[in-house]
Amino acid sequence: MAARSLATREPNDRLEALIHEAAVSHAGLARRVNMRGSRYGLDLRYDKTSVSRWVRGQRPRGRTTAIIAEVLGEKLGRTVSLEEIGMTDRADLAAGAGLNFARDVAGAVEHACALWRSDAGQGRRPFGATVSASALVSPSRDWLITGLDASVSRSGGHRVADADPDAVEATLLSLATLDHRFGGGHVRPTLVHYLDSVVSGLLTGSYGDSLGRRLFSAAARLTELAGYLAEDVGQPSLAQRYYIQALRLSQAAGDRGFGGYVLAAGMSRLAPQLGYPREVTQLARAAREGSVGRAPFTVQSLCHAAEARGYALLGEKRLFTATMGQALEVLTRADPAAEAEWVSRFNQAYLAVELAHGYQDLENPALAARWAEKALTELPEARVRRRAVALLLLATARVLDGEVEEGCRSAEQALDLMRGLRSHLATQRLSEFRRRLRAFHQVEAARCFYSRLTESATS
């Protein structure tokens, strides 16, 4: 029975890779584990066969797992975690993976790679419970007080090539383009696999400080995209974990501007979905404060817009209007040609959508419709998901303003765009429109829309 049970286990590739990196034989590792155990008063009698079993997936009992990590770390000259040797229980890892802002670069690599591994291993299962308010806000405080990492250079593993960060950047652009067109449901599995199988290997390789910062920059951007895709498949808790790790990776890259972007465009927008609308403004202000003097005008505008959205959620009309006015003014100073590519998606069209959301939260459908229409005149056709969301914002605003026929017409245009689009964010907005339309179910336009919706669901 024991042999049959062992045969069904998955090989521990991470342990095998570390043994190879440490240049230690199975017999040598067993001997080191036994000797270290004796220091702790343990009578361990492992041999090379025992190590072979571990590599094949067997997990030793008691304190042995920690001792294995300890002796391998001693041989490699660095700290080795249980995650690195593949001996952390997956359920425990999934519950806590990605929720901490690492103190140092080694921890940043470890935490990010652990999150990617755990996510890749989860399949389609939900990823942990909703995070607490402290887990939402604490990383932003850590980011605010953390200084620049003195060096990110690393020795160990294969040598990273100068072109590797460029390859990661190119992959990011390709996946982002697919995401805009088809939604996170189509793209996320590929992105998670790439992070776990390729980017993790690069981060644990050998590189100097300059090359390392380029690599961390690319990894941060890809991790931020993974957070957004997690949102788009309806997993806000998982998205938060990715945003925390993107924030820390951007710090290792020395890019406070992108860190502010992660806080404002990602974490603050996510807060209401996690049940913490009051934290939106706090996160947005942290983004602005932490990136002051190091963020382009576009990111500064984004920080103001995120703060304004928080005020709208709290019903603070005056503060919303004033802060969104600052966002509009700062954006006029931006020079898109001189700014980084990663911030290019935040433009007048993006800001118009944010204004439409805000005015809808403030129950001002006329202004919500006005800004949604403006967004649609400027959003490119390739931004399928964002156009669908803008159309549904417009549809909802028109229905709330009593223009049911016009609202249903806009919603039907959104349905056309949503064919082939796997997006929780768009579906969520459609559900909101349907909820608002119920009050007008006897209107002919509403009945026709529901009929069209039924046809779309069965086709």
Image (cartoon, helix red, strand yellow):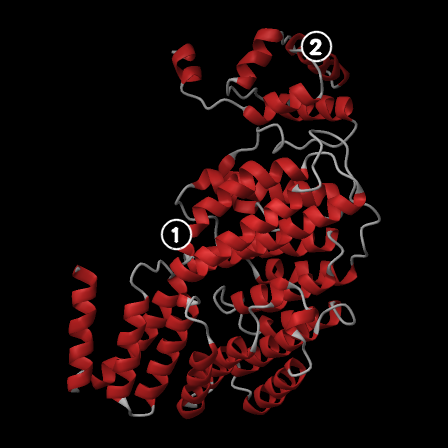
Q: Which residue is mark 1?
A: 186
> Looking at the image, is 281 positioned above or below residue 370?
above
Please give the name of the residue rendered at 60% of the width and 21% of the height, measured from the top-left corner.
Answer: 16
Residue 28: assigned label? 2
**Could you give the CA–CA distance between mark 2 and mark 1, rounded to whole angstroms?**
46 Å
- Residue 163 pos. (x, y %): 67, 42
State the residue in front, 170 or 359: 170
Q: Residue furthest front?
A: 337
Where residue 336 appears, x then y in whole percent?
64, 73
**Is residue 161 visible in this depiction of the protein?**
yes
In the rendered image, is residue 442 in sight?
no
Query: In the image, 312: left or right of 256?
Result: left
Q: Residue at x 37, y 82 (%)?
A: 394
Picture layout, residue 400 above or below residue 45: below
- The type of residue carrying mark 2 is Gly
Q: Quadrant of the C terminus?
A: bottom left
How busy is the neighbourhood of tag 1: few (under 14 within 10 Å), some, or many (20 plus)? some
Which residue ends up furthest to the right in the rendered image?
150
Mark closer to the observer (2, 1) = 1
Q: Give the residue displayed 50% in from the left and 64% down from the top.
A: 274
Picture quadrant of residue 348: bottom right
Quarter occupied by residue 256: bottom right
Q: Which residue is pictured at 63% across the width and 82% down the height?
A: 327
Which element is circle 1 on? helix
